Image (spheres, rainbow, N blue to C red):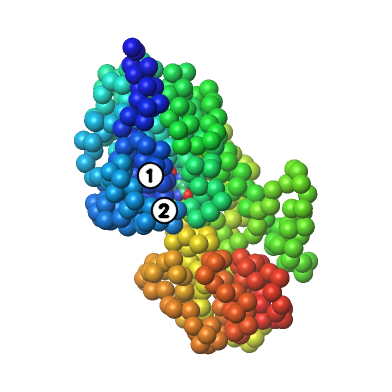
Amino acid sequence: MTIEQELAGKIESRAARIAVIGQGYVGLPLALEYARAGFTAVGIDNDPDRVAALNLGQSPTPDVSDEELRELLGSGRYAASGDFRTLAASDVVIICVPTPLRKSKDPDISYVVSAAEQTAINYHAGQLVILESTTYPGTTDELLIPMLSQRGARIGETAFVAFSPERIDPANKQFKVRDIPKVVGGATPACTALAAALYRTIVPHVYEVSSPTVAELAKLYENTFRNINIALANEFALMCRKLGVSSKEVIDAAATKPFGFMPFYAGPGIGGHCIAVDPFYLSWKMRLNGYEPRLFHTADEINQAMPDYVVEMVTEALNARQKSVNGAAILALGVAYKANVGDIRESPALDILAELIAKGANVQYSDPWVPTAPIGDAELKSVELTQAMIADADCVLILAEHAAFDFRHIVGAARLVVDARNATFGLDAPADRVVRL
Ligand SMILES: NC(=O)c1ccc[n+]([C@@H]2O[C@H](COP(=O)([O-])OP(=O)(O)OC[C@H]3O[C@@H](n4cnc5c(N)ncnc54)[C@H](O)[C@@H]3O)[C@@H](O)[C@H]2O)c1
């Protein structure tokens, strides 16, 4: 039996031992999905606090409840660990570590390098190694594979390597890991076949492509598509405001077309770990190849200007009431980058609130998902949302459309609402009291 056949057999019989490096929004649900499918999965993380919390059954992500985590811990098919030597006992290693940007907006690939180094150190013949972190095209071929090859791995013969982008959308109740098709691109046909067989044990559809680079680019195209379309919605909202029309109403109307259209909506700016970040991985790589992407840069300019535009909306709304930002009591609702998550990475709310504070506003925020948030030089604490809190604010500023907020009640109780999410769209309110993007 060849090494490839042996590994294929272990995958089919669920005897393959799976290690997932990085137990965050992506890695934890993935490891648990394999445990649920009957594999033994270990979640490896270099943050000891996270490992300890996971082993106590405390989930850091809204997509995994403490109950399901405890159930899988109890089954013995999942455990978290900080010990990379566990990799040496694994048949499959999946890398799901962060890929942020440096201050210069160049890719920070250090987490992938470190996880790949650990994988290479613990490599043994017969392993399948899959990179899932969103990254620049060429990472698998140029970074991961050489590290394994240096340890004696013969790709496609003794080691199998693929890229398969993670596509989860945290807090999306309709589409979880098991509902989202996987794209898989292996370094050789055998690598693709093994990685695809593994994913078929947990997802209904696997789409095979001809190389890791195609799979890396597919993910970057998806998120650049979103980034550019959000920019279009943002610019469209600015145009609609000049015409005195709601962009939300127009986009909802356009979305009734059953083909050739997909709605994106305006907001206070782009945030999160993906849409705000991933296109820079592509543009960085393209610049190295002598090409400067144009469309994305225009989109980024529009998206980056949105936080200032929201500050301007607040300033104008207060001004219309003969009030200045300086000294105004502003209650922000939501600082997370999107609804129903506690993720504040790249959240435009942080810049908006820092700017309002710099202009002299007394800013408070309420966000059931984010107990504390770094705003400028300060660390603000979320306040409980009470009737008095809403009524006392000179301006209630809606920045995240969390389901926990009762927007009808808020509109009824507030003196002035600036709604940067169109969360109050459709609610009856005088135009001078509710200003929408
Ligand atoms: N969050 C999303 O919605 C989403 C969706 C699709 C793809 N992605 C991509 O998936 C990747 C992971 O993102 P995430 O949101 O899960 O990040 P995360 O910050 O939630 O989790 C990453 C985890 O990896 C751990 N870690 C960092 N370096 C490590 C190392 N060298 N060894 C072991 N553990 C390490 C961290 O402690 C953390 O627990 C990124 O490339 C991201 O772009 C994220």
User: 128 or 174: which is nearer to us?
Assistant: 174
Earlier residue among tags 1 and 2: 1
**Can residue 256 be seen from the camera position used here?**
yes
Q: Is residue 423 left or right of residue 107?
A: right
Quarter of the image with the N terminus is: top left
The residue pinned by badge 2 equals 64
Q: Residue at x 48, y 66 (%)?
A: 335
**Can residue 285 be seen from the camera position used here?**
no
- Image quadrant of residue 377? bottom left
Quarter of the image with the C terminus is: bottom right
Three-letter amino acid code at the position of disc 2? Val
Q: Marks 1/2: CA distance?
A: 9 Å
Q: Residue at x 52, y 79 (%)?
A: 330
Q: Is residue 94 left or right of residue 330?
A: left
Q: Residues within 10 Å of mark 1 (few under 14, many from 20)?
A: many
The residue at the far top in this view is 1
- Image quadrant of residue 220? top right
Q: Is residue 204 above or below residue 241?
A: above
Q: Is residue 102 left or right of residue 220?
A: left
Q: Is residue 41 left or right of residue 428?
A: left
Q: Return the mark for residue 321.
A: none
